[in-house]
Image: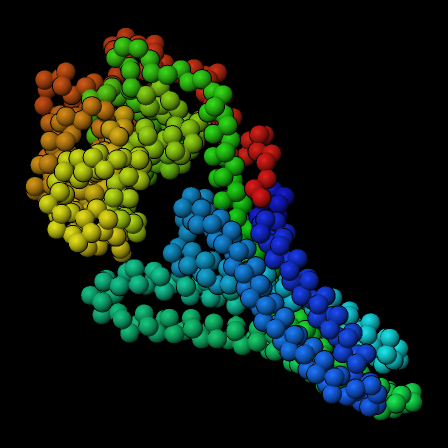
């Protein structure tokens, strides 16, 4: 775990909790049952070999014990798999949360590698590492105890041999960790490269670079093969040692037994019981390999898990605070349900302030794509700056949990692919619209006839970013989701680029009657808006952009209503002035690592 992470932030989830408690207890019971059967076998075998009592009965009992051990081993494998899958399920949820709210840009290949390779390492450690330890330790202990009861000298040989084997596993663990980390690095690099290559497939085909890209992937594959070979040398040594230790034990037991004068029956029994160590010792021989693979994976997963936990904690704290916080609520007068954005600062200076009334239309523009993206991220709550002031309908977005924010802001973007879901679920994603509202939204955006043609209607599942819908139909579907519930702020990011002429005409009609504030990024705003105010984020002077309801302004086309900060021409007046004390309180509340983060995530 990185030293930069707070304690326990990047730790894997607790193992002994919930349903896993019962599974681990069952595994321990299976180990004890096998140990009892081993002791039982140790006492009956000499009697059978010396012809005492009833050989037929003893034979049946020993065969029954062997079959029972086999049945327990079957159950052990099933329970171990259930334990591993239950644990990985919890880790996978954290990975997906972190992938959806990343702290930094992460390639698709890295995400896939984490949810496959790294999770496989976690699952193998739980199912094939921890489970053999839980079962094997009591089993081996029972066998050694049985040997001490039978022949102490031979039991000492077994104990010393197993101790030497454990020391060898510990010695090999360090080089195995280094080689596992090396393999994981080159494999992740290759996964990221393949994902980027497939994404750019059309450009590669047009440029005639298919063979060249295949060769690059092949060179990366060669590095992966070399790293895998290096790891296999060490892991092979560990597995080979585990496979040979029982054979060595059999020879040592026979030699030592002959030297100390043990009877043939005792030696045969000791060799037989030592053979029962083969399965647990072989399993334990792989534990070190799984452990080191887990440690290599954990170095990658730690910051991802910490990010997911920080998000969960932040959302929980916002929910708690929301129950006690009293928002100022919508101010009276013209500022009611207004959008107020201020105090957005970057290296160049302060971005212009915006106050937009319900019914206003605002064009977000500027030469700085980075500033535009910054504003969109703040408005859609994709990122938060503690000093930023973003208020919609009297509520600060930075202080609201995601479920409350989505009721205030509807967002549709050209660059946002549709998730795999039914059409109905896509539209209801922000709000819980009933069937009548759903049908109204579908008709409102012009999709009624198209949806009616689909075999499952609104229940049709979209795949691969929106198939079987066309590009225009996908844009209309995004618009329907953004319009659901008529949020006070509607943000459209170049959505009109994906619409055909009919779709843009329909969008123009929708926006003409929309009651809330509409903020658009568009190359041709005059096609979808009758009139609009210009919010140019490139301006560095302290400016205030006032956006009034479009229906109250007869002017058509762009209206540059830019005012100096504090100007008497500000028609909104004091209700939208921000308070330094309130902003300081918001900064504390919006900090995801604030002092109230004292709850664990288990």
Q: How many marks?
A: 0
Q: Is residue 66 above or below residue 489?
A: below
Q: Quadrant of residue 206?
A: bottom left
Classify residue 366 as left or right of residue 499. Answer: right
Towards the viewer: 192 or 163: 163
Where residue 365 appears, as percent x and y from the top left, is 23, 33
Q: Is residue 88 above or below residue 485?
A: below
Q: Residue at x 20, y 51 (%)?
A: 456
Towards the viewer: 49 or 442: 49
Towards the viewer: 144 or 518: 144
Q: Is residue 464 above or below residue 162?
A: above
Classify residue 320 as left or right of residue 2. Answer: left
Residue furthest right as drawn: 261
> According to the image, what is the colour scheme of the structure?
rainbow
Q: Residue at x 42, y 71 (%)?
A: 220
Q: Quadrant of the C terminus?
A: top right
Q: Residue at x 48, y 66 (%)?
A: 186
Res. 1 visible in picture: no
Q: Is residue 95 above or below residue 335?
A: below
Where residue 10 appears, as percent x and y from the top left, is 57, 48
Classify residue 112 as left or right of residue 243. Answer: left
Where residue 93 appears, as percent x and y from the top left, is 47, 50
Where residue 518 appears, as percent x and y from the top left, is 22, 28
Res. 196 visible in picture: yes
Q: Quadrant of residue 70?
A: bottom right
Q: Residue at x 52, y 73 (%)?
A: 228
């Amino acid at each position: 775990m990185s030293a930069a992470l707070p304690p326990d932030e990047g730790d894997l989830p607790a193992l002994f909790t919930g349903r896993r408690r019962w599974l681990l207890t069952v595994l321990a019971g299976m180990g004890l049952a096998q140990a009892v059967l081993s002791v039982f076998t140790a006492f009956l075998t000499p009697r059978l070999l010396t012809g005492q009592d009833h050989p037929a009965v003893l034979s049946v009992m020993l065969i029954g014990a062997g079959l029972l051990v086999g049945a327990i081993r079957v159950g052990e494998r099933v329970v171990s798999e259930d334990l591993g899958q239950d644990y990985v399920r919890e880790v996978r949820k954290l990975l997906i949360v972190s992938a959806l709210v990343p702290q930094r840009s992460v390639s698709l290949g890295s995400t896939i590698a984490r949810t496959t390779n790294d999770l496989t390492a976690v699952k193998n450690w739980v199912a094939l590492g921890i489970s053999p330890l839980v079962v094997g330790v009591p089993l081996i202990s029972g066998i050694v105890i049985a040997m001490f009861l039978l022949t102490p000298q031979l039991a000492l040989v077994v104990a010393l041999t197993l101790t030497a084997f454990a020391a060898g596993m510990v010695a090999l663990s360090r080089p195995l960790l280094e080689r596992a980390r090396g393999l994981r690095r080159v494999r992740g690099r290759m996964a990221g490269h393949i994902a980027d290559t497939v994404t750019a497939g059309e450009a590669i085909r047009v440029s005639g670079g298919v063979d060249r890209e295949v060769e690059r992937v092949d060179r990366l594959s060669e590095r992966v093969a070399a790293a895998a070979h290096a790891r296999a040398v060490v892991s092979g040594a560990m597995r080979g040692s585990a496979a040979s230790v029982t054979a060595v034990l059999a020879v040592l037991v026979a030699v030592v037994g002959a030297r100390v004068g043990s009877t043939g029956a005792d030696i045969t029994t000791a060799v037989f019981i030592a053979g029962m160590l083969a399965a647990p010792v072989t399993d334990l021989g792989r534990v070190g390999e799984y452990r080191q693979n887990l440690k290599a994976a954990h170095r990658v997963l730690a910051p991802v898990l910490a990010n997911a936990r920080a998000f969960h904690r932040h959302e929980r704290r916002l929910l708690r605070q929301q129950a006690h916080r009293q928002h100022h609520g919508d101010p009276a007068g013209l500022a009611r349900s207004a959008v107020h954005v201020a105090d957005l600062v970057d290296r160049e200076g302060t971005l212009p302030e915006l106050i937009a009334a319900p019914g206003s239309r605002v064009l977000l523009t500027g030469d700085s794509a980075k500033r535009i993206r910054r504003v969109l991220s703040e408005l859609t709550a994709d990122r938060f700056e503690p000093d930023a002031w973003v208020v919609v309908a009297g509520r600060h977005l930075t202080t609201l949990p995601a479920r409350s924010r989505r009721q205030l802001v509807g967002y549709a973007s050209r660059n946002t692919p549709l998730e795999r879901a039914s059409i109905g679920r896509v539209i209801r994603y922000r709000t819980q619209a009933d069937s009548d509202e759903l049908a109204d939204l579908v008709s409102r955006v012009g999709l009624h006839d198209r949806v009616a043609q689909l075999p499952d209607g609104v229940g049709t599942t979209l795949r691969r970013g929106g198939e079987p819908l066309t590009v225009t139909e996908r844009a209309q579907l995004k618009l329907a989701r953004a319009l659901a519930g008529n949020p006070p702020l509607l943000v459209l990011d170049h959505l009109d680029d994906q619409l055909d002429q009919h779709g843009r005409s329909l969008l123009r009609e929708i926006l003409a009657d929309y009651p809330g504030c509409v903020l658009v990024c568009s190359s041709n705003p005059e096609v979808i808006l009758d009139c609009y105010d210009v919010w140019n984020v490139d301006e560095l002077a302290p400016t205030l952009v006032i956006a009034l309801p479009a229906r109250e302004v007869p002017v058509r086309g762009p209206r540059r209503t830019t005012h100096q900060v504090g100007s008497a021409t500000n028609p909104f007046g004091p209700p939208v002035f921000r308070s330094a004390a309130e902003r300081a309180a918001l900064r504390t509340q919006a900090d995801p690592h604030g002092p109230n983060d004292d709850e664990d995530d288990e």
